[in-house]
Image (cartoon, rainbow, N blue to C red):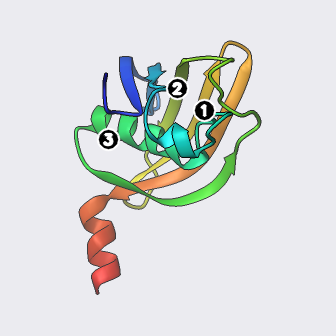
Amino acid sequence: MAKEIFIITDLSKTTDIKENLHIRGHLKINWTHDIFSGHFPDNPVLPGVVQVQMITEVFNKTMNDDFILARASSIKYPNMVVPKICDTLTFDIHVIKPKTSGFGINATLVHENLTFLKLKGHFVPADDFKNLHNS
């Protein structure tokens, strides 16, 4: 049994004519992970913070670097992720290079016609974030 809460099963990236990056793929959820015994014991639900972490880890893997979600201007959870609905999620991340450091993103987690996460935020390099907060 894998100890991870999720596994990236496939990932693709493309660049549009404005040089914005588009990342898409699938995540398989490990419903036997210990986190679900407490969230919630008889009705497991994928925590929202884990959904945001999924987007962060996919972004870091794609960029081959360590970024931190420094700002989230909007996070919405229109539906709950529960085992009866799905064990695989599709992620879709539109990355926009802003004029300042880091990257703006618009991301979703979906399964078929259900949306579970809508996230608009800004990733910055982890070292920049740490240096800013250690000053």
Q: Which residue is mark 1?
A: 108
Q: What amino acid type is highlighted by mark number 1?
A: Thr
Dot 2 falls on a residue whose secondary structure is strand
Q: Quadrant of residue 48?
A: top right
Q: Residues within 10 Å of mark 3 (few under 14, many from 20)?
A: some
Q: What amino acid type is highlighted by mark number 3?
A: Asn
Dot 3 falls on a residue whose secondary structure is helix
Quadrant where the C terminus sits is: bottom left
Q: Residues within 10 Å of mark 2 (few under 14, many from 20)?
A: many
Q: Which residue is mark 3?
A: 60
Q: Are marks 3 and 1 in contact (CB under 8 Å)?
A: no
Residue 131 at what x, y percent from top left?
26, 75
Q: Residue at x 41, y 29 (%)?
A: 6
Task: Name the foreground residue: 94 vs 35.
Answer: 35
Residue 107 at what x, y percent from top left?
57, 36
Q: Residue furthest front?
A: 42
Looking at marks 3 and 1 on the same chain, the residue that comes earlier in the sequence is marked by: 3
Q: Which residue is mark 2?
A: 91
Q: Residue at x 53, y 26 (%)?
A: 92
Q: Are marks 1 and 2 in contact (CB under 8 Å)?
A: yes
Q: Quadrant of residue 115?
A: top right
Q: Left of 13 or right of it: where is 109?
A: right
Q: What amino acid type is highlighted by mark number 2?
A: Phe
Q: Is residue 91 above or below residue 103?
A: above
Q: Left of 124 or right of it: where is 119?
A: right
Q: Are marks 3 and 2 in contact (CB under 8 Å)?
A: no
Dot 1 falls on a residue whose secondary structure is strand
Q: CA distance from mark 1 to mark 2?
A: 6 Å
